[in-house]
Image: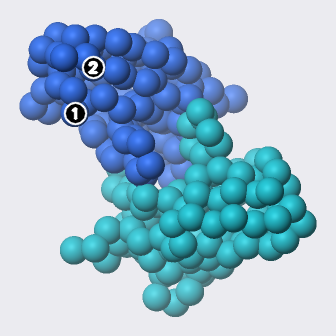
Amino acid sequence: DAGVTQSPTHLIKTRGQQVTLRCSPKSGHDTVSWYQQALGQGPQFIFQYYEEEERQRGNFPDRFSGHQFPNYSSELNVNALLLGDSALYLCASSPRGQVYGYTFGSGTRLTVV
Amino acid sequence: GEDVEQSLFLSVREGDSSVINCTYTDSSSTYLYWYKQEPGAGLQLLTYIFSNMDMKQDQRLTVLLNKKDKHLSLRIADTQTGDSAIYFCAEGNTGFQKLVFGTGTRLLVSP
């Protein structure tokens, strides 16, 4: 049973560019959340998707946007990249209503130069 | 507001017990979690405890919760070198399904 799959694993982008990160949730999970983990910090909640809609959002600017597809997979888009966007981006999936059911992917390491 | 604090570093010898501490501020938290992160990897859920419990034991892991002081601890018995990692405490609320993480405690286990 595959867990949460994220792609790509590593990415290098230039300031001002745009990036798209992808996530496939664990089988049976329909809710996807995205977290940003800066070096030496704990993960910070970006937003959560369920039924193809953004349900909650953390304290992140509008440059961060997302999408969920009918098969529950999700994308995270970041526009106008800043050096400070360099981080590990983690996707977590869960069955709806089960906070303790979170499964995290291994993340995408984004470096902005 | 929501805030979770942890000490940054803990060093123990193999075979000893490790105790990692965490304090949180949100009294409405329903679940409290311990996650493990190894270098270059994502987060692995170790255990969680409901806010109406005081203690939970799962093999070598014991979680203690003091709701009055908003203090959570994770005890790892017979710590092994493979337990070396960063441990994150997190709080969650049933209604919102988002997790608030601490900054992590780096556990170093020496032979």
Residue A93: tell me if it is visible. Answer: yes
- At 56% from the left and 86% from the top, the residue drawn is A69
Does A93 appear above or below A45?
Answer: below
Q: Which chain appears blue?
A: B
The chain to which mark 2 is attached is B
Nearer-the-camera pick, B23 or B110: B110
- A79 left or right, relative to A2: right
Q: Quadrant of the N terminus of chain B?
A: top right
Crowding at mark 2 (Cα within 10 Å: few <14, some 14-19, many 20+)? many
Q: Position of residue B72 (x, y in %)?
A: 39, 19
Residue A60: image x %, image y %? 78, 53
Q: Nearer the viewer, residue B18 or B99?
A: B18
Q: Quadrant of residue B83?
A: top left
Q: Secondary structure at mark 1?
A: helix
Question: What numbered label is drawn on residue B82?
Answer: 1
The answer to whether mark 2 and mark 1 are in CB contact below 8 A is: yes
Q: Residue at x 37, y 41 (%)?
A: B38
Q: Which color is chain A depicted in?
A: cyan
For the point 28% across and 11% down, the residue is B12
Pointer 2 residue = B109
